[in-house]
Amino acid sequence: MTELGNHNAGIVIVGAGIAGVQAAEGLRKAGYDGALTLVGAEPHMPYDRPPLSKEVLLRAGAENTIALRDENFFAANKIDVMLGKRVCAIERPDRRVVLEDGSRLDYVKLVLATGSRPRVLAGLSPQAPGVFYLRTLADSLMLRATLARGGRVAIVGGGVIGLEVAAVAAGRGLAVTVIEAASRVMARAASPVIGAYLAKRHQEHGVAIRCGVSVDSARQDGDGCWRLALNDGCVVEAEIVVVGVGVVPETSLAGAAGLQVAKEGVVTDGFGRTDDSNIYAAGEVAYHVNGLEKGRQRQENWHHAAAHGAHVGRALIAPDTCYSEICGYWSDQYDTHLMVSGLPAGDVDVVRGDVTTNRFVVFHLVGGVVAGASAVNAAPELRVAKLLVRNRARVPASELQDPSTDLRKVAA
Ligand SMILES: Cc1cc2nc3c(=O)[nH]c(=O)nc-3n(C[C@H](O)[C@H](O)[C@H](O)COP(=O)(O)OP(=O)(O)OC[C@H]3O[C@@H](n4cnc5c(N)ncnc54)[C@H](O)[C@@H]3O)c2cc1C
């Protein structure tokens, strides 16, 4: 039995998303055999979020294929899963958390894996009929049913989620308008080459993309139609409005408990520890140290949430190495499978392959070093590119774009 396992109270993990589940598994793998409780506000067994804007929106029944683990996993690993329970306070002096129903759970160590919540736009309340934000399975099922009934769709925000929803809606033959405040789509998440490529794909599918404009006011009329007045004087009419303008870290518990919180998340070190040595934070909520980068950062992608959750779980038992991970994300839009590793854009972006063939890679160079890569329908090439990123390879642009250069040799 580990030292922590000798306490009756055990370890409590708040948040049953990917980071929380990975933390629980990381603890067991590291040899922790004491009491372990995973508390989640949502009523469902832990599930994967990326399919919510892809398969689940596209296909009835896909929601039955998104469990993060099968039910046996939790029993076999003696993880007590409490679902539909929101933790509403942390009583640090007594080392216990308070649940919404007033019950309390003692902890010897606490992990906050509370993720993020959507940023809400003024005038477009998530409760308003016809307005959708997309974070949970319930959100996705409601949106799927609404899209099936038809109507014009306005998507506020041309980031990953907005464009994935646009692809599904356009694929159903609906009229879709994307409203993006930045001068191009995917401005935060992708390089200009990838942004332009995706914008073109959407336009080929009939999606109207309006960049450089924002919603000044929104009004729903008696006919159920939303009228979004843009700051350039235009009005976009739609029965269905989907808002995807980013997320904010779910730090309210940590903040109310007096833990150090920045606007980027709960402040942690390279092991997930907060400024209270009994409380850790993992995944998207953590403003964390990554040994491969300078300073702290917050990442909003599945790879990080999974890797960081596992790392923090292990670190609770065996804090040997600082979190050091090159993260990235993927996105599916129509028949485009985009994979990004490391930085999504550089000060120089080098294309290898032909953009018009729908299969190419973009290397993102920072100061001549390969700091990231984006692959469109080119998973094998991304595997090699990841090695270049990991090795911080300095490869001339001319070599990267030359199809005769064997990048496996360069990466070796
Ligand atoms: C629609 C959608 C599509 C995505 N697609 C991709 C993709 O293609 N590729 C990619 O890399 N990333 C994608 N992501 C991002 C990825 O899913 C997230 O980075 C990841 O889910 C973060 O995991 P997490 O466990 O840190 O937080 P979350 O997944 O947000 O889980 C946190 C959990 O904690 C619970 N919680 C919060 N507060 C409390 C409380 N007080 N008490 C109890 N429980 C609480 C929440 O209800 C939630 O279930 C997508 C996200 C969404 C929403």
Image (cartoon, rainbow, N blue to C red):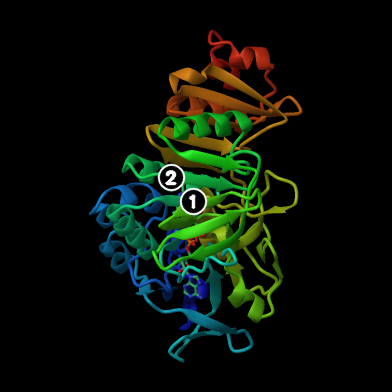
What residue is drawn where x is 39% and y is 44%? 175
In which quadrant of the rendered view does residue 52 lie?
A: bottom left
How dense is the environment of label 2, judged by Cα within 10 Å: few (below 14), some, or many (20 and up)? many
Marks 2 and 1 sit apart, C-alpha to C-alpha, by 7 Å
Residue 296 in percent (x, y) is at: 71, 54
Q: Nearest the camera: 23 or 237?
A: 237
Q: Nearest the camera: 142 or 48?
A: 142
Residue 49 in percent (x, y) is at: 41, 55
- Please say if 273 is above or below 278: above
Quarter containing the N terminus: bottom left
What residue is drawn where x is 41% and y is 63%? 130
Quarter containing the C terminus: top right
Sequence-earlier tag: 2 or 1: 1
In the picture, the disc for residue 237 is none
How dense is the environment of label 1, judged by Cα within 10 Å: few (below 14), some, or many (20 and up)? many
Q: Which residue is mark 1?
A: 155
Question: Farthest top residue?
Answer: 404
Amino acid at pointer 2: Val
Amino acid at pointer 1: Ile
In the picture, the disc for residue 176 is 2
- Would residue 193 appear left or right of 368 to someone viewing this image? left
- Please say if 368 is above or below 311: above
Mark 2–mark 1 contact, CB under 8 Å?
Answer: yes
Residue 247 in percent (x, y) is at: 57, 59
Residue 273 in percent (x, y) is at: 64, 66
